[in-house]
């Protein structure tokens, strides 16, 4: 049985969904019961991942066209099962195991370009009816997908922060943050990340710490607001960070504030827990599921008194004991690997 892994994620900037795909691929690669082929489009790629997973680069197209033409055609000609941990599901191939991270394009359509949301509506509608198996990254996302598409057998494969245990780069703050006290926010110009409101409230209140925003702008969001354009000497935009630079940002932050309106899981709080950084998170269902009682919650629709959020999150953090945070232990790589094994067994039992 030939199993192909859509490894386009290795050619992309690493955000939450690419991180999930990487961790799951490494977990699969350690399984001896199956043989996997990792495929990616030609061009720029993470060379470390390419070597670890033995990724083969092929095809004529790149990006979405590679995902919708080259990749499924390869699977058709080789009679392979296709696994896509992130990205869009194939519109033409049925023998697919697909992973759902959220349905934000349906919950908040105005946040996305017309073409983006139309394409994903069609793709998700097709894959919900034609698949070997669907998996979701949280109980919350499983429930939403099942209710929307009237299905009942979505499985769960959670995120993990095992990459932080493997990190070899020494934590080193970007020079722009050297010697500064700051609170940390991680996200993009995706409006559901709610950074605009956080920044506006921050500028109104008397906050002694700087506000550090880690993340990039992306073109598929239909946002007229200026999330990444607020100008103040106390707001620092670092762009995308990874490795030791990102680790240092967590370690030195007074608190992570994560104000999203909507998430499918939310990896930044989990990463903050790894570094024992206090977390203040929006009071939404999936954050309650993932963070449990280890974060301080606030309404994402009425952010106020940021100093109070920091103090309350810090008090929760002071109660921690043990070397590894309980939530990091809960969402372990061994749990993820076992979830993947169960998924494969059920998929091939069809």
Image: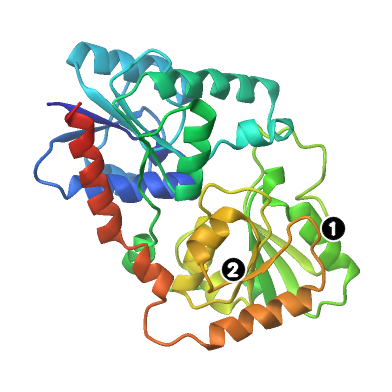
Query: What residue is disc 1 on?
Result: 231
Give the number of the disc on residue 321.
none
Give the number of the disc on residue 174.
2
Q: Nearer the viewer, residue 239 or 85?
A: 85
Indicate which disc, 1 or 2, sits on the residue closer to the N terminus: 2
Image depth: mark 1 or mark 2 in front: 1
Q: Position of residue 334 (x, y in %)?
A: 25, 60
SS at mark 1?
loop
SS at mark 2?
loop
Q: Is residue 265 left or right of residue 167?
A: right
In what quadrant of the picture does the C terminus appear?
top left
Q: Is residue 54 left or right of residue 113?
A: left
Q: In this view, does 37 lie to the left or right of 15?
A: left
Q: Tell me the CA gap for discs 1 and 2.
A: 19 Å
Q: In this view, does 185 lie to the left or right of 304?
A: left
Q: What residue do we see at 58% from left, 54% from top? A: 285
Question: Is any part of residue 62 visible from this angle?
Answer: yes
In what quadrant of the picture does the N terminus appear?
top left
Q: What residue do we see at 30% from left, 54% from top? A: 336
- Hey, which residue is sitting farthest left in the picture? 33
Counting every numbered tag in the picture gives 2
Specify few, some or many for label 1: CA neighbours under 10 Å numbering under 14, 14-19, or 20 or more: few
């Amino acid at each position: 049985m030939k199993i192909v892994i859509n490894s386009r994620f290795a050619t992309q900037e690493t955000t939450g969904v690419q991180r999930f795909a990487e961790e799951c691929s490494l977990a699969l690669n350690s399984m001896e019961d199956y043989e996997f082929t990792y495929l990616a489009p030609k061009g720029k790629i993470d060379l470390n991942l390419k070597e670890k997973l033995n990724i083969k680069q092929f095809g004529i197209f790149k990006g979405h066209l590679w995902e919708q033409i080259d990749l499924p055609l390869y699977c058709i000609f080789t009679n392979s099962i296709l696994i896509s941990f992130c990205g869009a599901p194939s519109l033409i191939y049925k023998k697919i195991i697909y992973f759902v991270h959220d349905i934000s394009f349906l919950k908040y359509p105005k946040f996305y370009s017309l073409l983006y949301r139309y394409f994903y509506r069609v793709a998700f509608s097709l894959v919900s009816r034609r698949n070997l198996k669907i998996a979701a990254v949280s109980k919350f996302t499983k429930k939403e997908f099942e209710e929307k598409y009237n299905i009942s057998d979505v499985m769960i494969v959670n995120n993990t922060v095992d990459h932080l245990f493997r990190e070899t780069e020494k934590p080193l703050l970007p020079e722009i943050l050297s010697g500064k006290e700051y609170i940390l926010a991680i996200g993009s110009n995706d409006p559901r990340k709610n950074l605009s409101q956080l920044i506006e409230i921050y500028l109104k209140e008397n906050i002694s710490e700087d506000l550090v925003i880690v993340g990039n702008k992306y073109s598929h969001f239909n946002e007229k607001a200026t999330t990444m354009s607020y100008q103040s000497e106390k707001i620092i935009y670092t762009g995308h960070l990874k490795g030791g630079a990102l680790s240092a940002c967590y370690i030195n932050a007074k608190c992570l504030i994560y104000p999203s309106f909507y998430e499918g899981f939310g990896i930044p709080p989990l990463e903050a827990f790894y570094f024992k950084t206090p977390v203040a998170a929006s009071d939404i269902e999936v954050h309650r599921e993932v963070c449990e009682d280890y974060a301080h919650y606030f309404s994402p629709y009425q952010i106020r008194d940021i100093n109070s959020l920091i103090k309350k999150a810090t008090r929760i953090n002071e109660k921690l004991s043990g070397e590894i945070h309980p939530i990091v232990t809960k969402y372990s790589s061994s749990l993820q690997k076992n979830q993947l094994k169960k998924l494969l067994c059920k998929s091939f039992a069809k």
